[in-house]
Image: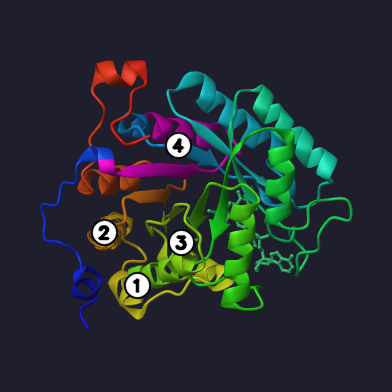
Amino acid sequence: MNAMANASCDAAPLPVRQPENLLKISFEFFPPRNEKMERDLWDAVKRLEPLAPKFVSVTYGAGGSTRERTHNTVSRITEETSLAAAAHLTCVSATREEVDDVARRYWDAGIRHIVALRGDAPEGEDTYTPHPGGYAYAADLVTGLKKVADFEVSVAAYPETHPTASSADADLDNLKRKIDAGAVRAITQYFFDGDVYLRFMDRVHAAGVNVPVVPGILPVTNFAQVRKFSAMCGTSVPQWMAELFEGLDDDPETRKLVAATVAAEQCRMLQANGVNEFHFYTLNRADLAYAISHILGLRPADDDQAETGSRRTET
Ligand SMILES: Cc1cc2nc3c(=O)[nH]c(=O)nc-3n(C[C@H](O)[C@H](O)[C@H](O)COP(=O)(O)OP(=O)(O)OC[C@H]3O[C@@H](n4cnc5c(N)ncnc54)[C@H](O)[C@@H]3O)c2cc1C
Protein backbone atom coordinates (compact mmCIF):
# COMPACT_ATOMS: atom_id res chain seq x y z
CA MET A 1 0.00 0.00 0.00
CA ASN A 2 1.14 3.54 -0.67
CA ALA A 3 2.80 4.55 2.54
CA MET A 4 1.98 8.25 2.52
CA ALA A 5 -1.63 7.64 1.60
CA ASN A 6 -1.84 5.24 4.50
CA ALA A 7 -0.31 7.73 6.88
CA SER A 8 -2.53 10.62 5.87
CA CYS A 9 -5.89 9.07 5.08
CA ASP A 10 -7.61 10.19 8.27
CA ALA A 11 -6.25 13.75 8.36
CA ALA A 12 -8.20 16.81 7.32
CA PRO A 13 -7.04 18.37 4.06
CA LEU A 14 -4.57 21.25 4.21
CA PRO A 15 -4.77 24.03 5.22
CA VAL A 16 -5.78 23.11 8.75
CA ARG A 17 -4.86 26.03 10.98
CA GLN A 18 -6.19 25.42 14.47
CA PRO A 19 -6.88 28.31 16.81
CA GLU A 20 -3.50 28.65 18.50
CA ASN A 21 -5.00 28.71 21.95
CA LEU A 22 -6.16 25.12 21.54
CA LEU A 23 -2.78 23.75 20.64
CA LYS A 24 -0.29 22.86 23.38
CA ILE A 25 3.19 21.64 22.68
CA SER A 26 6.21 20.71 24.75
CA PHE A 27 9.76 19.83 23.78
CA GLU A 28 12.17 17.31 25.23
CA PHE A 29 15.95 17.77 25.26
CA PHE A 30 18.83 15.76 26.63
CA PRO A 31 21.72 17.24 28.63
CA PRO A 32 24.77 17.97 26.45
CA ARG A 33 28.03 16.08 26.94
CA ASN A 34 30.47 18.65 25.57
CA GLU A 35 30.76 22.27 24.47
CA LYS A 36 29.70 21.66 20.88
CA MET A 37 26.60 19.80 22.07
CA GLU A 38 25.93 22.58 24.54
CA ARG A 39 25.96 25.15 21.71
CA ASP A 40 23.68 22.96 19.57
CA LEU A 41 21.25 22.53 22.44
CA TRP A 42 21.20 26.22 23.15
CA ASP A 43 20.59 27.05 19.47
CA ALA A 44 17.64 24.63 19.53
CA VAL A 45 16.22 26.08 22.74
CA LYS A 46 16.47 29.63 21.39
CA ARG A 47 14.89 28.68 18.07
CA LEU A 48 11.96 26.92 19.73
CA GLU A 49 11.41 29.42 22.54
CA PRO A 50 9.23 31.84 20.50
CA LEU A 51 6.77 29.00 19.91
CA ALA A 52 5.97 29.37 23.62
CA PRO A 53 5.71 25.70 24.54
CA LYS A 54 3.80 24.78 27.67
CA PHE A 55 7.06 23.41 29.03
CA VAL A 56 10.37 21.91 27.94
CA SER A 57 11.89 18.93 29.69
CA VAL A 58 15.43 17.62 30.10
CA THR A 59 16.14 13.90 30.40
CA TYR A 60 18.09 12.13 33.13
CA GLY A 61 20.82 9.73 32.01
CA ALA A 62 20.69 6.05 32.82
CA GLY A 63 21.72 5.34 36.39
CA GLY A 64 21.74 9.03 37.28
CA SER A 65 24.80 9.52 35.08
CA THR A 66 23.69 13.01 34.06
CA ARG A 67 22.56 14.21 37.48
CA GLU A 68 24.65 17.39 37.41
CA ARG A 69 24.28 18.02 33.68
CA THR A 70 20.51 17.65 33.84
CA HIS A 71 20.42 19.99 36.82
CA ASN A 72 22.63 22.58 35.10
CA THR A 73 20.65 22.45 31.87
CA VAL A 74 17.25 22.80 33.57
CA SER A 75 18.57 25.60 35.78
CA ARG A 76 20.06 27.48 32.85
CA ILE A 77 16.82 27.24 30.86
CA THR A 78 14.93 28.51 33.90
CA GLU A 79 17.32 31.41 34.46
CA GLU A 80 17.97 32.51 30.89
CA THR A 81 14.70 31.95 29.01
CA SER A 82 10.99 32.54 29.41
CA LEU A 83 10.42 28.76 29.27
CA ALA A 84 9.02 26.58 32.04
CA ALA A 85 11.54 23.77 32.43
CA ALA A 86 10.87 20.30 33.80
CA ALA A 87 13.54 17.90 35.05
CA HIS A 88 13.34 14.16 34.44
CA LEU A 89 14.27 12.09 37.49
CA THR A 90 14.62 8.31 37.86
CA CYS A 91 14.79 5.77 40.70
CA VAL A 92 17.85 3.91 39.40
CA SER A 93 20.96 3.33 41.54
CA ALA A 94 20.04 5.79 44.25
CA THR A 95 18.61 5.71 47.75
CA ARG A 96 15.39 7.51 48.52
CA GLU A 97 17.38 10.12 50.42
CA GLU A 98 19.61 10.80 47.43
CA VAL A 99 16.64 11.14 45.10
CA ASP A 100 14.86 13.39 47.60
CA ASP A 101 17.97 15.58 47.80
CA VAL A 102 18.07 15.97 44.02
CA ALA A 103 14.40 16.94 44.08
CA ARG A 104 14.93 19.40 46.92
CA ARG A 105 17.74 21.07 44.95
CA TYR A 106 15.35 21.48 42.03
CA TRP A 107 12.72 23.02 44.26
CA ASP A 108 15.30 25.41 45.74
CA ALA A 109 16.37 26.40 42.21
CA GLY A 110 12.77 27.31 41.37
CA ILE A 111 12.02 24.21 39.29
CA ARG A 112 8.49 23.05 39.97
CA HIS A 113 7.91 20.32 37.39
CA ILE A 114 9.42 16.82 37.53
CA VAL A 115 8.97 14.01 35.00
CA ALA A 116 9.10 11.02 37.37
CA LEU A 117 10.38 7.75 35.92
CA ARG A 118 11.59 4.40 37.10
CA GLY A 119 14.46 4.33 34.62
CA ASP A 120 16.09 1.31 33.05
CA ALA A 121 18.81 -1.05 34.26
CA PRO A 122 22.24 0.59 34.19
CA GLU A 123 24.57 -0.41 31.35
CA GLY A 124 25.92 -3.93 31.76
CA GLU A 125 22.86 -5.17 33.68
CA ASP A 126 20.13 -7.08 31.88
CA THR A 127 17.20 -6.47 34.14
CA TYR A 128 16.10 -3.66 36.37
CA THR A 129 16.53 -4.33 40.08
CA PRO A 130 15.32 -1.72 42.55
CA HIS A 131 18.03 -0.19 44.73
CA PRO A 132 17.61 -1.74 48.22
CA GLY A 133 17.11 1.67 49.81
CA GLY A 134 15.50 3.32 46.82
CA TYR A 135 12.15 3.96 45.22
CA ALA A 136 11.27 0.74 43.40
CA TYR A 137 8.89 2.06 40.74
CA ALA A 138 7.78 5.37 39.31
CA ALA A 139 4.58 5.35 41.38
CA ASP A 140 6.70 5.20 44.56
CA LEU A 141 8.82 8.06 43.26
CA VAL A 142 5.72 10.19 42.62
CA THR A 143 4.58 9.58 46.21
CA GLY A 144 8.06 10.51 47.49
CA LEU A 145 8.28 13.67 45.38
CA LYS A 146 4.94 14.91 46.61
CA LYS A 147 6.29 14.56 50.17
CA VAL A 148 9.35 16.64 49.31
CA ALA A 149 7.34 19.51 47.84
CA ASP A 150 4.21 20.22 45.85
CA PHE A 151 5.81 19.52 42.46
CA GLU A 152 3.84 19.31 39.24
CA VAL A 153 4.58 15.69 38.30
CA SER A 154 4.38 14.08 34.87
CA VAL A 155 4.87 10.34 34.27
CA ALA A 156 5.37 7.95 31.36
CA ALA A 157 2.65 5.97 29.57
CA TYR A 158 2.95 3.20 26.99
CA PRO A 159 0.38 2.94 24.17
CA GLU A 160 2.01 -0.36 23.14
CA THR A 161 2.52 -1.52 26.76
CA HIS A 162 5.83 -1.32 28.62
CA PRO A 163 8.04 -4.22 27.42
CA THR A 164 8.38 -5.81 30.88
CA ALA A 165 4.77 -5.36 32.02
CA SER A 166 3.03 -8.63 32.88
CA SER A 167 0.03 -7.54 30.75
CA ALA A 168 -1.50 -4.50 29.10
CA ASP A 169 -4.05 -4.28 31.93
CA ALA A 170 -1.34 -4.46 34.59
CA ASP A 171 0.49 -1.64 32.80
CA LEU A 172 -2.68 0.45 32.74
CA ASP A 173 -3.19 -0.23 36.47
CA ASN A 174 0.36 1.01 36.96
CA LEU A 175 -0.42 4.23 35.06
CA LYS A 176 -3.47 4.70 37.26
CA ARG A 177 -1.33 4.21 40.39
CA LYS A 178 1.03 6.93 39.20
CA ILE A 179 -1.87 9.33 38.65
CA ASP A 180 -3.45 8.41 41.99
CA ALA A 181 -0.07 9.13 43.63
CA GLY A 182 -0.28 12.71 42.37
CA ALA A 183 0.88 12.91 38.74
CA VAL A 184 -1.14 15.38 36.70
CA ARG A 185 -0.06 14.33 33.22
CA ALA A 186 1.37 11.37 31.36
CA ILE A 187 3.60 11.59 28.31
CA THR A 188 3.65 8.58 26.03
CA GLN A 189 6.49 6.56 24.68
CA TYR A 190 6.81 7.42 20.99
CA PHE A 191 4.70 5.45 18.53
CA PHE A 192 4.18 5.67 14.77
CA ASP A 193 0.69 4.30 14.29
CA GLY A 194 -1.85 6.91 15.37
CA ASP A 195 -4.56 4.27 15.78
CA VAL A 196 -2.46 2.58 18.46
CA TYR A 197 -2.59 5.79 20.52
CA LEU A 198 -6.30 6.35 19.93
CA ARG A 199 -7.15 2.78 20.98
CA PHE A 200 -4.93 3.16 24.04
CA MET A 201 -6.76 6.36 24.98
CA ASP A 202 -10.09 4.49 24.83
CA ARG A 203 -8.69 2.08 27.41
CA VAL A 204 -7.18 4.91 29.48
CA HIS A 205 -10.55 6.67 29.68
CA ALA A 206 -12.40 3.41 30.39
CA ALA A 207 -9.99 2.87 33.31
CA GLY A 208 -11.03 6.23 34.75
CA VAL A 209 -7.77 8.06 34.03
CA ASN A 210 -8.76 11.59 33.15
CA VAL A 211 -5.50 13.54 33.18
CA PRO A 212 -3.91 14.49 29.84
CA VAL A 213 -1.97 11.63 28.26
CA VAL A 214 0.15 13.57 25.81
CA PRO A 215 1.37 11.76 22.69
CA GLY A 216 5.16 11.67 22.46
CA ILE A 217 6.19 12.38 18.87
CA LEU A 218 9.57 11.33 17.55
CA PRO A 219 10.48 12.77 14.15
CA VAL A 220 12.71 10.07 12.68
CA THR A 221 15.94 11.22 11.12
CA ASN A 222 18.02 8.08 11.55
CA PHE A 223 15.72 5.23 10.61
CA ALA A 224 18.22 2.41 11.24
CA GLN A 225 18.88 3.65 14.77
CA VAL A 226 15.21 4.17 15.51
CA ARG A 227 14.37 0.67 14.34
CA LYS A 228 16.96 -0.75 16.75
CA PHE A 229 15.80 1.39 19.66
CA SER A 230 12.13 0.66 18.95
CA ALA A 231 12.77 -3.07 19.28
CA MET A 232 14.11 -2.44 22.80
CA CYS A 233 11.36 -0.12 23.98
CA GLY A 234 8.43 -1.99 22.45
CA THR A 235 7.42 0.49 19.75
CA SER A 236 6.29 -1.17 16.54
CA VAL A 237 7.66 0.18 13.29
CA PRO A 238 5.11 -0.09 10.49
CA GLN A 239 6.24 -1.57 7.18
CA TRP A 240 5.16 1.60 5.36
CA MET A 241 7.79 3.51 7.33
CA ALA A 242 10.55 1.11 6.37
CA GLU A 243 9.49 1.57 2.74
CA LEU A 244 9.52 5.36 3.06
CA PHE A 245 13.09 5.43 4.35
CA GLU A 246 14.30 2.76 1.95
CA GLY A 247 17.30 3.92 -0.10
CA LEU A 248 17.88 7.05 1.97
CA ASP A 249 20.70 5.79 4.21
CA ASP A 250 23.20 8.12 2.54
CA ASP A 251 20.79 10.97 1.89
CA PRO A 252 20.26 12.90 5.14
CA GLU A 253 18.61 15.88 3.42
CA THR A 254 15.82 13.80 1.90
CA ARG A 255 15.50 11.80 5.13
CA LYS A 256 14.87 15.04 6.98
CA LEU A 257 12.11 16.10 4.58
CA VAL A 258 10.52 12.68 4.82
CA ALA A 259 10.81 12.73 8.62
CA ALA A 260 9.03 16.09 8.88
CA THR A 261 6.28 14.92 6.55
CA VAL A 262 5.69 11.65 8.40
CA ALA A 263 5.60 13.26 11.84
CA ALA A 264 3.39 16.13 10.65
CA GLU A 265 0.95 13.66 9.07
CA GLN A 266 0.92 11.65 12.28
CA CYS A 267 0.13 14.77 14.33
CA ARG A 268 -2.52 15.97 11.90
CA MET A 269 -4.22 12.59 11.99
CA LEU A 270 -4.33 12.88 15.79
CA GLN A 271 -5.46 16.51 15.57
CA ALA A 272 -8.30 15.44 13.31
CA ASN A 273 -9.25 13.04 16.10
CA GLY A 274 -9.38 15.77 18.72
CA VAL A 275 -5.81 15.65 20.08
CA ASN A 276 -4.48 19.14 20.85
CA GLU A 277 -1.35 18.46 22.83
CA PHE A 278 1.96 17.05 21.59
CA HIS A 279 5.31 16.35 23.23
CA PHE A 280 8.20 16.39 20.75
CA TYR A 281 11.35 14.35 21.29
CA THR A 282 13.67 16.90 19.68
CA LEU A 283 17.01 15.08 20.09
CA ASN A 284 18.29 18.63 20.65
CA ARG A 285 17.49 19.76 17.11
CA ALA A 286 14.99 22.49 16.42
CA ASP A 287 14.40 22.15 12.69
CA LEU A 288 11.91 19.28 12.57
CA ALA A 289 10.03 20.19 15.74
CA TYR A 290 9.75 23.78 14.51
CA ALA A 291 8.51 22.79 11.05
CA ILE A 292 5.95 20.35 12.43
CA SER A 293 4.67 22.87 14.98
CA HIS A 294 4.31 25.38 12.13
CA ILE A 295 2.33 22.89 10.05
CA LEU A 296 0.06 22.26 13.04
CA GLY A 297 -0.76 25.97 13.08
CA LEU A 298 1.59 27.35 15.69
CA ARG A 299 3.27 30.70 15.06
CA PRO A 300 5.98 32.48 17.08
CA ALA A 301 4.77 34.84 19.74
CA ASP A 302 5.17 38.51 18.81
CA ASP A 303 8.42 40.01 20.00
CA ASP A 304 6.75 42.15 22.64
CA GLN A 305 4.78 39.11 23.83
CA ALA A 306 7.94 37.04 23.93
CA GLU A 307 9.63 39.66 26.06
CA THR A 308 6.89 39.51 28.67
CA GLY A 309 6.90 35.74 28.46
CA SER A 310 3.25 35.55 27.42
CA ARG A 311 2.06 32.41 25.66
CA ARG A 312 0.14 31.85 22.48
CA THR A 313 -0.53 28.28 23.43
CA GLU A 314 -2.98 27.65 26.22
CA THR A 315 -1.35 27.49 29.65
C1 LIG B 1 8.13 10.33 28.30
C2 LIG B 1 9.26 9.44 28.73
C3 LIG B 1 10.42 10.02 29.25
C4 LIG B 1 11.49 9.21 29.66
N1 LIG B 1 12.62 9.83 30.17
C5 LIG B 1 13.62 9.06 30.67
C6 LIG B 1 14.77 9.66 31.27
O1 LIG B 1 14.91 10.89 31.34
N2 LIG B 1 15.74 8.84 31.76
C7 LIG B 1 15.64 7.48 31.71
O2 LIG B 1 16.54 6.79 32.19
N3 LIG B 1 14.56 6.88 31.14
C8 LIG B 1 13.55 7.64 30.62
N4 LIG B 1 12.45 7.04 30.04
C9 LIG B 1 12.42 5.57 29.93
C10 LIG B 1 11.85 4.90 31.18
O3 LIG B 1 12.71 5.11 32.27
C11 LIG B 1 11.71 3.41 30.88
O4 LIG B 1 10.70 3.21 29.93
C12 LIG B 1 11.53 2.52 32.09
O5 LIG B 1 11.72 1.15 31.66
C13 LIG B 1 10.16 2.56 32.74
O6 LIG B 1 9.96 3.73 33.39
P1 LIG B 1 8.50 4.10 33.99
O7 LIG B 1 8.63 5.36 34.71
O8 LIG B 1 7.48 3.96 32.94
O9 LIG B 1 8.36 2.88 35.05
P2 LIG B 1 7.16 2.33 35.91
O10 LIG B 1 5.93 3.13 35.73
O11 LIG B 1 7.66 2.13 37.30
O12 LIG B 1 6.91 0.91 35.24
C14 LIG B 1 7.99 0.09 34.84
C15 LIG B 1 7.51 -1.34 34.64
O13 LIG B 1 7.28 -1.95 35.89
C16 LIG B 1 5.93 -2.39 35.98
N5 LIG B 1 5.54 -2.14 37.39
C17 LIG B 1 5.23 -0.97 37.94
N6 LIG B 1 4.99 -1.11 39.27
C18 LIG B 1 5.15 -2.42 39.54
C19 LIG B 1 5.08 -3.21 40.73
N7 LIG B 1 4.76 -2.67 41.90
N8 LIG B 1 5.34 -4.54 40.65
C20 LIG B 1 5.68 -5.10 39.46
N9 LIG B 1 5.77 -4.41 38.28
C21 LIG B 1 5.52 -3.08 38.33
C22 LIG B 1 5.17 -1.58 34.95
O14 LIG B 1 3.99 -2.19 34.49
C23 LIG B 1 6.21 -1.49 33.86
O15 LIG B 1 6.27 -2.67 33.13
C24 LIG B 1 11.39 7.80 29.58
C25 LIG B 1 10.24 7.22 29.03
C26 LIG B 1 9.18 8.02 28.61
C27 LIG B 1 7.95 7.39 28.02
Badge 3 is on which residue? 190
| Residue shown at the point (63%, 73%) measured from the top left | 170
The correct choice, above or below, for 231 with respect to 54 in the image is: below
Left or right side of 203 for 195: left
CB of mark 4 near ligand 1 (< 8 Å): no
* Three-letter residue code for mark 3: Tyr
* Three-letter residue code for mark 1: Asp
| Residue shown at the point (41%, 70%) measured from the top left | 202
Badge 1 is on which residue? 195
* Three-letter residue code for mark 4: Phe
| Residue shown at the point (22%, 84%) measured from the top left | 1
Q: Secondary structure at mark 3?
A: loop
Q: What is the x, y in percent for residue 162?
A: 59, 69
Q: Which residues are magenta?
A: 22-46
Spatial separation of the CA atoms under disc 1 and disc 4: 26 Å
Nearer the camera: disc 2 or disc 3: 3
Which is nearer the N-term, disc 1 or disc 2?
1
Q: What is the x, y in percent for residue 165?
A: 65, 73
Which is nearer the N-term, disc 3 or disc 4?
4
- Can residue 37 be found in the magenta stretch? yes
Spatial separation of the CA atoms under disc 2 and disc 3: 22 Å
Left or right side of 221 for 12: left
Q: Nearer the viewer, residue 249 or 223?
A: 223
- Can residue 242 be found in the magenta stretch? no
Which is nearer the N-term, disc 1 or disc 3?
3
Q: Evaluate if marks 2 and 4 touch, with contact meaning CB atoms under 8 Å apart.
A: no
Q: What is the x, y in percent for residue 32?
A: 57, 38
Badge 2 is on which residue? 254
